[in-house]
Structure formats: structure tokens, C-alpha cells
């Protein structure tokens, strides 16, 4: 049996196994029929999967269909054999009820593919929000050498001489439409201007966040995450990624060697410095659980909250993806954090080099876009985790708290980090859309909007609906954001300072199930507490009046997967993973090979 670096390649158990000659013939004949030769497949060269996430259903990642050609070239030139295969499509904007439901489905599917086929290593093609975590979660579980290739952001969007950023412009355009500043045709035109080319969201939404964090974790080549999709450099990164994975198989550098606790803590800090999405803790905690590294929400507060915001990208800032790349991208941000002593320089990356080697000397190329550590956009700009009598953990993004918001809610000199307000509760986004402009609700500039039934079980999958615009009448009066609280998520492109990802969610009996319109709530950002100002006795009574499930009543499942996910999924604070999957770790090493197919 052929060996690589003294080791047997797992693909040889399919294609070249003297102990099992009749099965070898059966395994190999069908892979010969599209052009690979017998000698080639039995040459002992590593078989490298290209997990293709792009398709017509996933426009954000569609450019991977082109880039895969250069990945193949890189694999070939380094002596490997490429095999490309599709993954479950994950389009953030297209999939109903939410791509959040499909992340775990794509994960479970990819685990089966990586483990059950003759693959020695894999290139994970990532981009749109959930494509990145699902791929990294699967690579963590299977633990064969794996490298991620970002498809890159779209070019900058422009409208009437101003940058228009993905998602961020949608939330703004909705406000303008509600306020009567634009008509419907103008609304569509303004939103479409933000999507001028192939690629993923050009803002610091969940896609740019997760692709940046994949690089920060060491799972992508240094400098590769931020390259815009249509740029020539993107093709080069694809080629280099193909070459790199062959080297990783030769040296047996696996996800478990890269995805260490140090790597995760580095990524948590990078997330603060880039102004990363509130989806990042869900996804990073999920990846950590599948690789068996401890990472909790309290790590996010302890390690990340005090890190300053350096990257001036929408929604927290003003620029977009092309600017981010030209300013130096992830290596420039990491270089700055490393020189400030915030990163563990020893963490190993996919290229076999340390963080210190990769980024230690990388400068910032445009200080308007990536600020030096000494002159940040905001101090202490990370995510903060709040708790209280409504939930054990919920996340708030400090970098997007606007001056307007601070002025209105956080300016009481006696109590500068806290405010009290009455709440109006919505049972899901349909209820919100139906009633938000109803004057009978009495929503004013001191109202907190609460939405529930929107978590991993309730929705199911956890919808991005917590960022709720105020009633049109308030927008016209100059109130652009109200505090929002919910057990769902919000788009990473939203600049809303919501308190979200509340766990446990209402559907499993979390405190949000007990809230009633008209209750008062106290939000203390400084002490990281949120409490409903209702007596414990009253809360006990309200709980007793909930239905038989002990939680908030949610609509019936519409598909088999919705039902299965509801039975198996955990809460946002622990990554919303399929809980029975967590015990399957390093299965390529720990569980041997799968049994023969015939
Ligand atoms: Fe795909 Fe934003 S919708 S990256
Ligand atoms: Mg989204």
C-alpha cells in the first residue's frame, strides 16, 4: 500500500488495497470512467477533495465554480489528485425559513462525505455566512487535513457617489421607505446597488467576519480572506490553496493541530478588532465543540470585550470589502494586535508557520480603513454577554452603539450605563410586521422591543429578526433605533445595538416566554445585566400559566429536517449544534475506516 511520509493514505483503502483486491476493483472502476487512469489512482498520490459550496442556488459562493479550476491546478502541480463534490447549498438570503436551519444539515452531510469517501485532505470552499462554520465544523469532526478557501467579497457597492454595503443598505433603505423618503422602485434600486459583482456581502457582516476568522484561526492562507472575489489575486490564492493542502497531507497537519484553544482566543480578539458579527460566537463555539476545545460565552467577554475596534467597515464604520483588502486585510489587523501583545504568536496555521511568523511584521497600508492600535475607532468594542431573569446569556455588540443611542439611553449621569423602559412584545416576525405601525401599541422612544419564538427550536434554526426597525412615525421623528431584545439572531450587517441570541430561548422555557407588553425592564450594559422588573412570585405564576410544553408555543414543523433539528439542537450560547454529534471527534483517527460498501 502506498504511503505518504511513512503513513498509509486513507484513499488507498479504497483504490489500492492488496488485502482486499475484489473491493479495490469495485471502488476504483467508477472513478476511472471520467478520465483518471488506473496508474494515477494507484500512484500513492493523495486524493484531495474540493468541497464545492457554490451553485446557482448560492450566488455568494458561485464564483467557486470558477476558482475550483485553479484549486485543481494547484493540487495537480503539487502532486495530488483533485476530486470535486457538492455540499448542501447554504444561501443566507435565499433560504427560508432561515439558512440557520441548514448549517447543521450541511455539517452533518459534509461529515458523511469526508469520512465515507476516499479523501486524504480537503479544500473547503467558504463564503456566504453559514458555509464557513458548517465546513469548519465538519473538518473538525472528521479531522483529515483541511484548508479553507474564501470566495471573497463583492466589489464595493456605490449609489450616487456613496458606498452602499450589503445588508446595511437594506436596513437603511427599509427605514427610508417607511419614512416615505423613497418609493418602492427606488428601494429596490438602492438595495441592488450594493451587489455589483460576484462574491459575498461586502460589509463586515457574518460572511466577512467568518472568512476573516477562518484565517485568524489559521485555517486559510494568510492574506487570503479579504481578497475581493473578482480580483486576480483571488485566482492566485485558489492556486496556492490547492498546493498547500497537498503539503498538509504530506505533513499530516490536521484541524486538531490548528484549531487549538489559543487559536480560538486569537480569533475572539480579532472579531472585536474587525467589528465582527454577533453570529460569530455561535459559530466559533460550535466549531470548538466539534474539535473538543473548551470555548464559552464568558471567554468572549473576558478575552474580547476590551479589544478596540480597528477596522472601519460598515456597519460599525464607513468602508467596504475592497478597502479592507487594500488596507492589508486580516494580516494587518492581526499584526497590529500581535504587536500590542494581544495574540498568542505560537498558534500554528495551515501553512505550518506560526501567527508570529505570518503576521508579526505585516503593516497597515491605509490607516483610514484599518486603524493603528494606538488610534482605534472605538475602545472596548467587542461583544458583551448579558444575563438576568430573562436569560442565562445574550450577546450585544458594543461597537455599533451609536451616539444617538448612547445619548437617549445611556446618558443618565447617576447611572450612565443603564436604562429602564417599558416593553412591547412580539410573537415572531409576522406579529412584528403586522403590528409595528399600530399606534395602539404606544411605542415611543423609550420602549424596548422584544421578539420571541425565534431561536434554534422555536423558528426553527434561529431567524435573523431581532433587529426591528421602529414604527414609521418614530423614524420620521428622528428615532432610528430602539433597543431590541430577542431569542433570535440578527444579521451581521445590522448596526442595531440589539440584545440577541438569548439562551435559553422562549420555546424551551426561557424567561422571554414570560414577558408581557407593558412590563418594565432594566438594561444595565455596564454590569451586563438585563432584568424584567416583575416580582419572582408573579413570574412563577406566569410560568404556571404556560401551556403543557412548559415553554412558548411554536408552530408545527413544515419539513422532516425541521422536526429532526428541533429534537437534537442545543441553544445559541453553546453553538446551537446537534448535541448527539459532539461526541464524534477526530473520527478519521478514532473510529478507523468505514466498513466496505459491498
Ligand atoms: Fe451571502 Fe451575505 S448573503 S454573504
Ligand atoms: Mg444573515
Image (cartoon, rainbow, N blue to C red):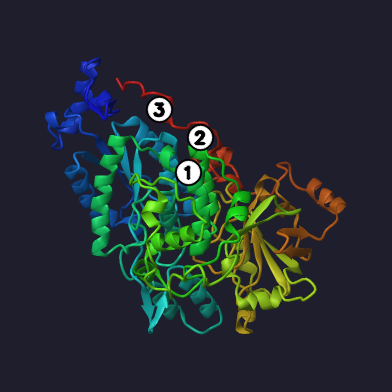
Q: Is residue 17 above or below residue 55?
A: above
Give the CA separation, mark 1 to mark 2: 10 Å
Of labels 2 and 3, the one closer to you: 3
User: In the rendered structure, which disc, 2 or 3, sits on the residue that comes first in sequence?
Assistant: 2
Work out which quarter of the rendered image holds the N terminus and state it: top left
Disc 1 crowd rating (10 Å Cα; few below 14, some 14-19, many 20+) is: many
User: Where's residue 10, x and y in %?
Assistant: 30, 28
Q: Secondary structure at mark 1?
A: helix
Circle 2 is placed at which residue position? 581
User: Where's residue 236, x and y in %?
Assistant: 23, 57
Please give the name of the residue rendered at 38% of the width and 37% of the height, measured from the top-left corner. 254
Give the CA separation, mark 1 to mark 3: 22 Å
User: In the rendered structure, which disc, 1 or 3, sits on the residue that comes first in sequence?
Assistant: 1
Query: What numbered label is drawn on residue 589?
Result: 3
Q: Secondary structure at mark 3?
A: helix
Please give the name of the residue rendered at 87% of the width and 51% of the height, measured from the top-left corner. 537
Please give the name of the residue rendered at 49% of the width and 66% of the height, measured from the top-left corner. 493
Disc 3 crowd rating (10 Å Cα; few below 14, some 14-19, many 20+) is: few
User: Where's residue 231, x and y in %?
Assistant: 26, 65
The answer to whether residue 75 shows anywhere in this view is yes
Disc 2 crowd rating (10 Å Cα; few below 14, some 14-19, many 20+) is: some
Q: Secondary structure at mark 2?
A: helix
Query: What numbered label is drawn on residue 104?
Result: 1
Q: Is residue 290 left or right of residue 389?
A: left
The reply to whether discs 1 and 2 touch (Cβ–Cβ < 8 Å) is yes
Residue 519 lies in what quarter of the image? bottom right
Asked whether 230 or 262 is in front, the reply is 262
The answer to whether residue 65 shows anywhere in this view is no
Amino acid at each position: 500500500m502506498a504511503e505518504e511520509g511513512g503513513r498509509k493514505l486513507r484513499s488507498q483503502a479504497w483504490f489500492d488495497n492488496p488485502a482486499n483486491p475484489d473491493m479495490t476493483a469495485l471502488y476504483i472502476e467508477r472513478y476511472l470512467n471520467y478520465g483518471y487512469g488506473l496508474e494515477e489512482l494507484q500512484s500513492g498520490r493523495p486524493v484531495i477533495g474540493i468541497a464545492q459550496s457554490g451553485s446557482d442556488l448560492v450566488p455568494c459562493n458561485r464564483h467557486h465554480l470558477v476558482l475550483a479550476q485553479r484549486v485543481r491546478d494547484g493540487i495537480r502541480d503539487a502532486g495530488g489528485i483533485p476530486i470535486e463534490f457538492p455540499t448542501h447549498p447554504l444561501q443566507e438570503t435565499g433560504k427560508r425559513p432561515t439558512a440557520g436551519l441548514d448549517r447543521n444539515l450541511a455539517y452533518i452531510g459534509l461529515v458523511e462525505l469526508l469520512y465515507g469517501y476516499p479523501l486524504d485532505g480537503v479544500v473547503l470552499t467558504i463564503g456566504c455566512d453559514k458555509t464557513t462554520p458548517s465546513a469548519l465544523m465538519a473538518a473538525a469532526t472528521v479531522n483529515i487535513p483541511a484548508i479553507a478557501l474564501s470566495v471573497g467579497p463583492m466589489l464595493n457597492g456605490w449609489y450616487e457617489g456613496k458606498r452602499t454595503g450589503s445588508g446595511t443598505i437594506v436596513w437603511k433603505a427599509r427605514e427610508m421607505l417607511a419614512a416615505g423618503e423613497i418609493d418602492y422602485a427606488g428601494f429596490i434600486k438602492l438595495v441592488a446597488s450594493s451587489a455589483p459583482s460576484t462574491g459575498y456581502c461586502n460589509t463586515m457582516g457574518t460572511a466577512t467576519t467568518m472568512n476573516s476568522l477562518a484565517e485568524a484561526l489559521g485555517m486559510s492562507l494568510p492574506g487570503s480572506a479579504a481578497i475581493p472575489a473578482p480580483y486576480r489575486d483571488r485566482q492566485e490564492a485558489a492556486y496556492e490553496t490547492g498546493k498547500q493542502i497537498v503539503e498538509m497531507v504530506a505533513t499530516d497537519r490536521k484541524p486538531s493541530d490548528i484549531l487549538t484553544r489559543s487559536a480560538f482566543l486569537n480569533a475572539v480578539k480579532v472579531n472585536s478588532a474587525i467589528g465582527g458579527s454577533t453570529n460569530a460566537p455561535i459559530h466559533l463555539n460550535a466549531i470548538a465543540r466539534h474539535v473538543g476545545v473548551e470555548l464559552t460565552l464568558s471567554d468572549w467577554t473576558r478575552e474580547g470585550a476590551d479589544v478596540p475596534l480597528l477596522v472601519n467597515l460598515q456597519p460599525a464604520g464607513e468602508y467596504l470589502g475592497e478597502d479592507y483588502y487594500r488596507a492589508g486585510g486580516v494580516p494587518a489587523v492581526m499584526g497590529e494586535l500581535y504587536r500590542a501583545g494581544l495574540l498568542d504568536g505560537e498558534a500554528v496555521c495551515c501553512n505550518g508557520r506560526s501567527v508570529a511568523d505570518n503576521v508579526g511584521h505585516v503593516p497597515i497600508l491605509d490607516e483610514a480603513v484599518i486603524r493603528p492600535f494606538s488610534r482605534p475607532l472605538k475602545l472596548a468594542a467587542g461583544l458583551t454577554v448579558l444575563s438576568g431573569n430573562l436569560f442565562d446569556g445574550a450577546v450585544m455588540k458594543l461597537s455599533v452603539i451609536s451616539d444617538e443611542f448612547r445619548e437617549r439611553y445611556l446618558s443618565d449621569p447617576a447611572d450612565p450605563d443603564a436604562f429602564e423602559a417599558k416593553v412591547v412584545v412580539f410573537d415572531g416576525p409576522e406579529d412584528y410586521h403586522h403590528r409595528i405601525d399600530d399606534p395602539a401599541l404606544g411605542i415611543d422612544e423609550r420602549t424596548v422591543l422584544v421578539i420571541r419564538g425565534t431561536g434554534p427550536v422555536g423558528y426553527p434554526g434561529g431567524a435573523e429578526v431581532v433587529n426591528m426597525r421602529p414604527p414609521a412615525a418614530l423614524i420620521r421623528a428622528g428615532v432610528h433605533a430602539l433597543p431590541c431584545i430577542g431569542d433570535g439572531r440578527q444579521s451581521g450587517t445590522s448596526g442595531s445595538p440589539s440584545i440577541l441570541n438569548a439562551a435559553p430561548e422562549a420555546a424551551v422555557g426561557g424567561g422571554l416566554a414570560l414577558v408581557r407588553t407593558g412590563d418594565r425592564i432594566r438594561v444595565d450594559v455596564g454590569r451586563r445585566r438585563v432584568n424584567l422588573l416583575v416580582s419572582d412570585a408573579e413570574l412563577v405564576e406566569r410560568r404556571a400559566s404556560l401551556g403543557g410544553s412548559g415553554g412558548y408555543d411554536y408552530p408545527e414543523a413544515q419539513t422532516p429536517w425541521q422536526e429532526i433539528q428541533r429534537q437534537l439542537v442545543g441553544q445559541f450560547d453553546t453553538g446551537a449544534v446537534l448535541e448527539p454529534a459532539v461526541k464524534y471527534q477526530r473520527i478519521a483517527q478514532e473510529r478507523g475506516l468505514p466498513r466496505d460498501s459491498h
